[in-house]
Image: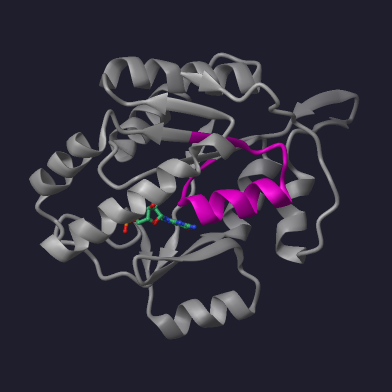
Amino acid sequence: MWRRPSCKNFLSPVSQPALVVAQAYVNYDLFRQGEVVKKGKIFVISAASGSGKTTLVRGLLKECKNLVVSKSYTTRALRANEKNRRDYIFVSGKVFAAARKKKAFLEWAKVFGNYYGTPADFVEKKLKIGKSVVLVIDVQGAAKVKKAAPGAVLIFIMPPSLRELENRLRKRKSDRSAQIKLRLKTARAEIAQAKRYDYIVINDNLSRAQRQLKEIVDSECGTEG
Ligand code: 5GP
């Protein structure tokens, strides 16, 4: 596991209204009726497709009871093994555009030709009640969240190698050959952005990567689980 030495947790002014909401709830301990109420944190997890992030995030959620994962909106078509509202909230381009216009997204991005967005109200509500929220989003989204909420913790899951990543994508059989090529090309660009993250976890051994992710969450939250 690699930790960026200059990682700081502080707040700075932002201009976008939807993002102010998230910033306001990051990293604060508030006093309510004489008692300290610990506010939740935002954890952003990014990885190239096929890096094993879904398995790792599932494991992390089982171990850390105070963590919840945000379900993104997407205009991408549902895959055979996916369920609406379990994996994503699948919507039409029209519905996505209307939500964007209403500033309903904490961040949004176009990835592989489809739109993806993080619902701001979900994140806001969870942080407010002291839950920490995991956003499994791409490098563009991660940069937007960090800019708006510098207290957010950015974690990049690195595949052991590009060859291994290609093997995993081919085994998955959920994408056509052209899509796999595009995902590998994007993976190279995403890996180049990993240096901007607070932590890099190399997923060459699932149980070690799982343990390291839990250690990051525990140390950033100053808690166990
Ligand atoms: P997939 O279609 O393979 O599930 O996801 C494609 C990419 O979109 C992944 O890198 C995933 O992390 C990213 N993604 C999923 N949801 C969001 C989101 O709400 N915002 C952004 N920026 N990226 C997302």
- Depth check: give the residue in front, 200 or 53: 200
Does residue 94 appear anywhere in the picture? yes
- Relative to 12, is 136 on the left or the right? left
Is residue 224 in the magenta section? no
Task: Name the spot of residue 14 as percent of width and height, x first.
Answer: 81, 56
Q: Quadrant of ligand 1?
A: bottom left
Residue at the spot x=63%, y=55% of the render? Answer: 144
Q: Pick out the residue farthest to the right.
A: 34
Is residue 137 in the magenta section? yes
Residue at the spot x=24%, y=66% of the render? Answer: 78
Please identify the quarter of the rendering in which residue 151 is found: top right
Residue at the spot x=34%, y=48% of the render? Answer: 187
Does residue 65 appear anywhere in the picture? no
Please identify the quarter of the rendering in which residue 222 is found: top right
- Relative to 115, is 98 on the left or the right? right
Task: Name the spot of residue 165 as percent of width and height, x first.
Answer: 22, 39
Task: Name the spot of residue 83 as percent of width and height, x first.
Answer: 25, 59
Q: Pick out the residue farthest to the bottom.
A: 94
Residue stretch in magenta: 134-155
Task: Name the spot of residue 159 as percent of width and height, x first.
Answer: 30, 33
